[in-house]
Image (cartoon, rainbow, N blue to C red):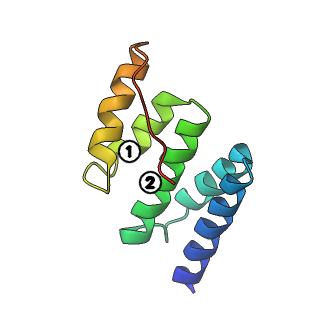
Amino acid sequence: SDAFYLDSALMTAVCLKEEQQFAKAIVGLETVLSDPRCQGAKGQAIRYELGLLYEAEEQWEKAAHVFQAIPSFHDVPQRLATLKGKQRGGDVGFRYAS
């Protein structure tokens, strides 16, 4: 089912992130985002996780772009504010979600 596919993709990415395999996790989630089934609450969760992965890889612009698609999700407003500082070259203190 669609939900199972999205859940599986998200869990795979989370597992890869735990193993510090950020690039593999990013490719997986980018692939899922291009699927028309990736929408609604699960789509938001996948975008959020992808944004966290971009942050882990210090891909600040990509992280900001993904987070801007889900501006009120979890702690995204604070993350976007922090990313603005990083994109300008400022070094803003940052805490990764666990």
Q: CB of mark 2 within 8 Å of CB of mark 1?
A: yes
Image coordinates of residue 82 in percent, x first then y, are 35, 30
From what the image shows, is residue 79 above or below residue 58? below
Inter-mark Cα distance, 2 to 1:
7 Å
Image coordinates of residue 7 in percent, x first then y, are 56, 75
From what the image shows, is residue 23 above or below residue 40? above
Q: Is residue 23 left or right of residue 50?
A: right
Image coordinates of residue 34 in percent, x first then y, are 55, 57
In the rendered image, which residue does mark 1 sit on? 67
Q: In this view, does 48 lie to the left or right of 1?
A: left
In the rendered image, which residue does mark 2 sit on? 48
Image coordinates of residue 59 in percent, x first then y, are 55, 30
Q: Residue at x 68, y 56 (%)?
A: 18
Rate crowding at label 1 as few (under 14), some (14 to 19) or many (20 or more) other CA atoms within 10 Å: many
Report which quarter residue 31 is drawn in. Answer: bottom right
Q: Which of 3 and 13 is in front in this view?
A: 13
